[in-house]
Image (cartoon, helix red, strand yellow):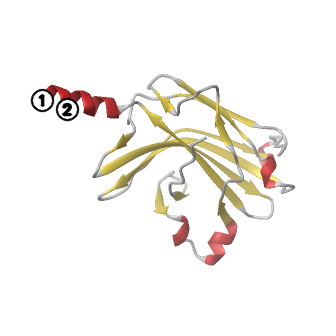
Amino acid sequence: DLLIPISLYLLNGNRQGEILSSESFSPIMQGIMEFSRKIPIKFDGRGSWTYFPGETLAGSYFLDELGDVSISAVEVSVLWQTEGKGNSDFGIHDFWRRSVADGDWIDNRTPGRFHTTLPNSPLSYDGELIKIYWLVRVRVFTEDGREFIDEHAFRLGNLTHLRLLQANIEK
């Protein structure tokens, strides 16, 4: 599986946040929020990590590698973010939260599931001035106040083929 670490966001109540790289956290914050490979995320039945608008993205996440921690909540987001010159941006396409406080049962040994129908835009793009990434992010909150975050990137659409087609037309 292709796993691409991107950036972390600290979100406020409006779901807008400041983009932070894991290196910019204070030592205290680094001890609370762990960006690790302890939450495997697998997409269902695909040999490719390219999806197209209108397709269903579905998969599982696995919490057993976290060990015997007491989990208070799990959040799963399907989101996009930009990187490049100027300001970065992001948008949350779909979001789920399971919480012990809300009566949800969370078992480290049982895989969690997610699925969503992908939107028409923005399409993934790997340009020189701007890049648009799509990813599934899983955040785990423990009873002792720690957070674990992991991500699995995928592509929405295939603009590479459009650039090749445009280059051929211009010749």
57 relative to 98, above or below: above
Q: Which residue is mark 1?
A: 171
Name, please, the residue furthest toward the bottom.
27
Q: Which residue is mark 2?
A: 167
Q: Verify CB contact (< 8 Å) between mark 1 and mark 2.
A: yes
Give x and y (percent) for residue 91: 45, 44
Going 33% across and 34% down the picture, which residue do you hit? Answer: 160
Give x and y (percent) for residue 112: 74, 37
Kind of residue sitting beneath label 2: Ala
Q: Quadrant of residue 167?
A: top left
Q: Which mark is residue 130?
A: none
Going 47% across and 22% down the picture, which residue do you hit? Answer: 54
Dot 1: element: loop
Kind of residue sitting beneath label 1: Lys
Question: In the rendered view of the protein, which quadrant contains the C terminus?
Answer: top left
Name, please, the residue furthest toward the top.
54
Give x and y (percent) for residue 56: 55, 24
Going 63% across and 71% down the picture, which residue do you hit? Answer: 29
Side of 87 relative to 65 (left or right): left
Work out whether residue 113 or residue 164 is closer to the camera in this orientation and state it: 164
